[in-house]
Amino acid sequence: MASENTKVTLYWLEQSRSQRILWLLEELNVPYEVKTFKRNKDMRAPPELKKIHPLGKSPVISIESPATSEPIVIAESGMIVEYLCDHFGGDKLIPSRYAAGKEGQIGGETEEWLRYRYYMHFSEGSLMPFLVFKLVTDTIKNPPGVPFFIKPIPRMVANQVEDQFVNPNLFATFDFLEGQLKTAPSGGPFFCGNKVTAADIMLSFPLIAASTRMPLNEKYPMLAKYVQTLEQQEGYKRAVEKIKEIDGKFEASL
């Protein structure tokens, strides 16, 4: 466990995955500091973030501890979530790994744990790429600085990419998630059962952001209800209020 003198700093960027790390910190009741950054007009992260991590992206955290001579800098949402859970009592956000009497056995894992481990990787590996593609094609449809008489050309190309590649994969992913919620252990309402897990926190950013760009209610009622349930979690609401307090507003957006 971390020392009382440990200091966590989250480098938060608007419209980024960093909000789910803020939720995790609230959920773990970890003392932390937030340093906020604004995107440039081109929607890229500001160059100041490269002073924290060479890639200049968010989320990034730094941890100062009496056990280390220099702050530990950690990037990538999945690693940040796992590291914080490892050191700050995150076992409450991780389902029990083995069924009773099957400890250490291959196949002895609980369904809740298998789902948890899967969705820790699913968010960035399977879901986010298609949401990012969708964001790119939406941008291509209305590119800034392009004469109006040329705009139909990139719009036609973007529509073709969406119809042939983006939308089939994106909706197949949503179909899968809808089915997973219907079969969640203990009836849900979360993907791993009746308690929120770190995997739900990982999923929160892409799904909440996606729900602001496309209606889910008609075709994906379970997924729409899941998003609403996430937004009603006390830790999530505290994280939103923290940003409103610091930055003046909060927008869940890709």
Image (tube, rainbow, N blue to C red):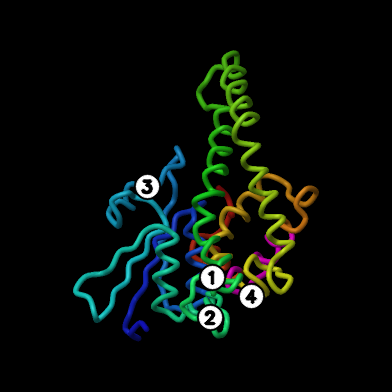
Q: Are marks 2 and 1 in contact (CB under 8 Å)?
A: yes
N-terminal of the pair, mark 4 or mark 1, is 1
Task: Depth check: give the residue in front, 190 or 73.
Answer: 190
Looking at the image, is 161 positioned above or below residue 94?
A: above
Determine the secondary structure under disc 2.
loop
Q: Which residue is mark 4?
A: 195
Q: Residue at the top extreme?
A: 149
Task: Depth check: give the residue in front, 235 or 33.
Answer: 235
Mark 1 is surrounded, within 10 Å at the Cα level, by few (under 14), some (14 to 19) or many (20 or more) other residues, namely few
N-terminal of the pair, mark 2 or mark 1, is 2
Determine the secondary structure under disc 4.
loop
Report, in whole angstroms, how far the alpha carbon at label 3 lies from the one at label 4. 37 Å
Of the residues shown, which amino acid type is indicated by label 4?
Lys
Q: Please identify the quadrant where the N terminus is shown.
A: bottom left
Q: Which residue is mark 3?
A: 46
N-terminal of the pair, mark 2 or mark 4, is 2
From the image, state whether disc 2 or disc 3 is nearer to you: 2
Q: Which residue is mark 2?
A: 102
Report, in whole angstroms, how far the alpha carbon at label 2 lies from the one at label 3. 50 Å
Of the residues shown, which amino acid type is indicated by label 1?
Gly
Q: Horizontal and vertical percent for residue 223?
A: 71, 57
Q: Horizontal and vertical percent for residue 130?
A: 56, 42
Q: Which residue is mark 1?
A: 107
234 part of magenta stretch? yes
Looking at the image, is 219 positioned above or below residue 116?
A: above
